Each structure stands twice: as C-alpha cells, then as structure tokens.
Amino acid sequence: MNKLYDYKIAVSIPYYNASKHIGNVVAKLPDYINTVIIVDDKSPEKIDKEEILKSVSPKIEVVFLENAINLGVGGASKKGFEYAIQKDFDIVVKMDSDDQMDANFLPDLLLPLIKNKAEMAKGNRFRDLDSLKKMPIVRRMGNLVLSFLTKASTGYWNNFDPNNGYIAIKIDSLKKVDFSRLSDRYFFETSLIAQLY
C-alpha cells in the first residue's frame, strides 16, 4: 500500500450536473492521490469551488478545467487526460462525478499498474451483486449485450465490464493513444480500449 505514495497519481473527474455529489467524491479520495482534475463540461449546475476545496484532503491539489462547449463525458475525460499527460503524472484515474464509483477500490485499480501487471485497469459493476440487484433488468440486459459487442469488436474477451468508466491507466500508455479517434460521448470507454488494443 505504501508503494502508492511513490507514484504521481491524478484523478480526473468529468463533471456535469452533479453538484449534490461532487463534494462527496473528492472528500473520499485518499491522500496518496496528488491531484484531482475536475473538468466542467459546460454544466448548467456550477461547481462550488469553495466546497470542493473544503472537502478534499489538504495534501491533494485541485485543478479546475472547463470545456468551452458541452462535449460529453468522453470530451471532458480527454481534457483531463491531456492535462495529466502535460503535467507528467505516472498514472491517471477516471472517476465520475455522481459518487457511484467507490474510492475504496482505488488500490485494486492502481496496484496492477504499479506492479507492471497491466497498463490499464477497469472497474467491474457486475462483481457487486447487491448493486446489480438494484439495477433495472432492462439496463442489466443492455449492459450485458453491449459488453459482449464491445468484447467482440476490441478483442478484450477477459474484460468482464468493458463499458465501465472507472479506469486507471499509465500515462506512458495514454501517450500512445490517438485522442482524435476517441469518442466524445458515451462510447468513450469502448473507443479507448479499442485504441489501446
């Protein structure tokens, strides 16, 4: 666990209409995270920057970026990733602003990268049976079908939940990605793993 403090790690959060949740998201980030990058995707609900700065650990730097127009989750994620590349982080994690991604799982995403067992790690929504039971059946079935199609098109058959947006990726790998070929909208995660493949 102490190895996490030896790496320069950023968390990038695409933000859109999540003013009730964003404070909780940053408050739960552990202090081995160096910087949180919040990318406002031209949200009608503005970010209360003072609340964020009060919520986050004083050891974590907070950077606020803003898209000139609404691009979608992919467009906001790309902006955060580009910042992480420019500032020469070792690893960047993408978390959503709606507080549905548990920061307690950060070590599970980060340690395979730190141990050089992976270049990217993704969360798996299907692992938590309680959360899965709460998901509407239509959404569950849609996710399963979309996951199968994503696996077939990218070749990542061992990735159980390829459309999950909880991602950790090494900056060295991210530098090799052609950002112009990444989707600005909801197919961002699929286009990212396709590019990595």
Image (tube, helix red, strand yellow):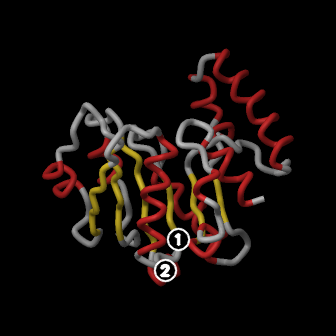
Q: In this view, does 106 lie to the left or right of 164?
A: left
Q: Image check: 67 left or right of 11?
A: left
Extreme-left residue of the structure: 50
Give the amino acid at mark 1: Ile
Of labels 2 and 1, earlier in sequence is 2
Q: For the residue labelled by badge 2, is the local secondary structure a helix, a strand or a loop? A: loop
Crowding around mark 2 (Cα neighbors within 10 Å: few <14, some 14 to 19, many 20+) is some
- Give the amino acid at mark 2: Tyr
Task: Name the residue furthest bottom.
Answer: 6
Quadrant housing the C terminus: bottom right
- Total labels drawn: 2
Residues tagged 2 and 1 counted as in contact (Cβ below 8 A): yes
Q: Residue 7 carries which label?
A: 2
Residue 171 is left or right of residue 155, and the answer is left
Q: Which label was assigned to residue 197? A: none
Which circle marks residue 91 in the picture? 1
In this rendered view, identify the residue nearer to me: 188 or 2. 188
Q: Residue 71 sits in which quadrant?
A: top left
Question: Crowdedness of circle 1 by 10 Å Cα count: few (<14), some, many (20+)?
Answer: many
Residue 34: x and y in percent read 36, 72
Secondary structure category for the residue under label 1: strand
Q: State the separation of the CA atoms marked 2 and 1.
A: 8 Å
Viewer-side label of 2, 1: 1
What residue appears at the point 57 percent right and 67 percent down from the top-left corner?
A: 110
